[in-house]
C-alpha cells in the first residue's frame, strides 16, 4: 500500500511539473507573438534610417542635392548670327579685338574674297567663335552695333545631370584607385598581385577617359559657341517690316541694280577674255577660208574630169 501511495504521489508531481512547463512555454510564445509587431517596426525604422544615411552620403559625395543642381546649373549656349557689313576688313578687325578683350578665341575661320569677274559674289567670312559664357550677351550686342544682323537665334542645352554624374564617376574611380594601390602594397602572392594590377590598369584607363569627357564638357559650358556669317554688301537688307509700296520700291530698285550689275559683269567678262576671243575668231576665219578653198579645188577637179558638153541642136525636119 505504501508503495502504491508513493507511486501515486510521484505521478502527481510529474503531471504537475509537466503542466507548469506547458503553461510557461505557452506564456512565452504568446509574449513573443505580442512583442514581434513592436520589433518589426523598429527594424524597418532602422533600415530606413540606414538607407537615408547612405543616400545622404552619396548625394554629398557627388554634390547632387537639388539645391546644388539649381544653383550650379550647367548650360551649353549656342548662337547663330547672319550679318551684313559695308566693309568686311574693318568689321573683322573690330571683332578680333573684341574677342581677345573678352578672353575668347576664334576656333575656325573661312573667308571668301569674291570674284573679279562677278559683282554678285560679294566677299564674306564664316567664323566659329568661342566666348566666355558670362560675356556672351555683351559680345552679341557688340556685333549688332557694328553690323546689320539679318537673322539671329540662340539655343541652350542643360547638361547639369551629365556633368554631376561624370564628376561622381571620377570620384568613385579615384577612390577605387587608392584602395587598389593599398591592396597592391599588401599583396602577398603573385596571383593577387597580377589580379590587382589588371584591375588597376582598367581603372586608370577609364579614369583618363572620363576625365577627358569632363574637360570637353566643361569647355562647352564655360565657353559659348557663336557661329557668325558676315557678308559684304553695298545696300543693307531691310530687317524691319515694310509696307506694300515700300516693298514695291525696294524690289524695283533691286531689279535695276541687278540689271546694271549684269551689264557690268558682261563687260568685265568680255574685256577679260578678249585675247581668247580674238584667237578663236582668227582660228575660225582660217578654218573657214581653208574649207572654202578646198571646196573650190574639188569643184575645179570635177570640172576637169568631166568637162561640160556643148548642147546639141536637134535635127530639123525636112
Image (cartoon, helix red, strand yellow):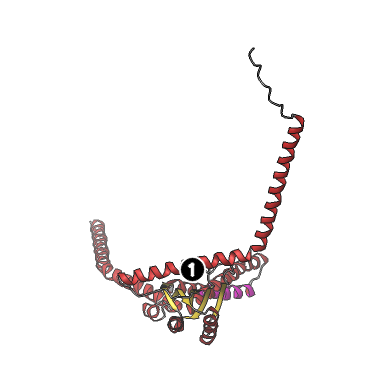
- Percent from the top left, x then y, of residue 287? 70, 49
Dot 1, crowdedness within 10 Å: few (<14), some or many (≥20)?
few
Which residue shows up at 43% across the image and 81% down it? 144
| Left or right, residue 272 beside residue 172 | right
Q: Quadrant of the N terminus?
A: bottom left
Question: Which residue is at the front of the view, 105 or 96?
Answer: 96
Q: Is residue 25 magenta?
A: no
Q: Farthest residue in the top direction? A: 318
Can residue 74 be seen at all in this image of the molecule?
no
Q: Whole-percent x and y of residue 159? A: 44, 72
Answer above or below: position of 305 versus 252.
above
Residue range corresponding to the magenta coloring = 171-185
Residue 175 painted magenta: yes
- Per the image, the residue denoted by label 1 is 260
The C terminus appears in which quarter of the rendering? top right
Picture coordinates of residue 35, whole percent (x, y): 26, 69
How far from the left and from the top, in percent, is residue 158?
Answer: 41, 73
> Is residue 25 or residue 67 the one in the foreground?
67
Specify whether residue 311 is in view. Answer: yes
Amino acid at each position: 500500500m505504501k508503495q502504491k501511495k508513493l507511486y501515486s504521489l510521484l505521478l502527481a508531481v510529474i503531471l504537475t511539473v509537466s503542466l507548469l512547463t506547458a503553461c510557461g512555454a505557452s506564456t512565452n510564445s504568446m509574449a513573443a507573438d505580442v512583442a514581434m509587431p513592436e520589433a518589426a517596426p523598429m527594424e524597418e525604422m532602422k533600415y530606413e534610417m540606414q538607407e537615408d544615411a547612405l543616400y545622404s552620403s552619396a548625394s554629398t559625395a557627388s554634390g547632387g542635392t537639388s539645391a546644388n543642381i539649381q544653383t550650379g546649373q550647367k548650360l551649353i549656349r549656342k548662337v547663330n548670327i547672319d550679318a551684313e557689313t559695308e566693309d568686311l576688313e574693318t568689321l573683322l578687325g573690330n571683332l578680333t579685338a573684341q574677342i581677345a578683350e573678352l578672353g575668347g578665341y576664334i576656333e575656325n575661320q573661312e573667308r571668301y574674297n569674291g570674284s573679279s569677274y562677278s559683282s554678285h559674289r560679294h566677299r564674306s567670312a564664316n567664323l566659329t567663335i568661342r566666348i566666355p559664357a558670362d560675356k556672351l550677351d555683351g559680345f552679341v550686342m557688340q556685333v549688332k552695333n557694328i553690323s546689320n544682323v539679318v537673322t539671329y537665334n540662340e539655343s541652350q542645352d542643360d547638361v547639369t545631370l551629365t556633368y554631376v554624374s561624370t564628376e561622381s564617376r571620377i570620384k568613385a574611380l579615384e577612390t577605387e584607385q587608392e584602395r587598389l594601390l593599398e591592396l597592391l602594397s599588401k599583396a602577398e602572392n603573385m596571383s593577387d598581385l597580377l589580379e590587382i594590377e589588371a584591375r588597376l590598369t582598367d581603372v586608370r584607363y577609364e579614369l583618363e577617359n572620363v576625365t577627358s569627357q569632363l574637360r570637353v564638357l566643361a569647355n562647352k559650358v564655360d565657353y559659348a559657341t557663336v557661329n557668325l556669317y558676315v557678308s559684304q554688301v553695298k545696300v543693307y537688307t531691310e530687317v524691319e517690316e515694310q509696307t506694300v509700296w515700300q516693298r514695291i520700291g525696294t524690289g524695283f530698285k533691286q531689279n535695276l541694280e541687278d540689271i546694271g550689275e549684269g551689264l557690268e559683269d558682261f563687260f568685265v567678262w568680255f574685256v577679260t577674255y578678249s585675247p581668247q576671243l580674238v584667237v578663236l575668231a582668227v582660228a575660225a576665219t582660217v578654218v573657214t577660208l581653208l574649207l572654202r578653198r578646198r571646196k573650190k579645188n574639188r569643184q575645179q577637179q570635177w570640172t576637169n574630169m568631166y568637162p561640160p558638153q556643148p548642147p546639141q541642136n536637134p535635127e530639123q525636119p525636112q
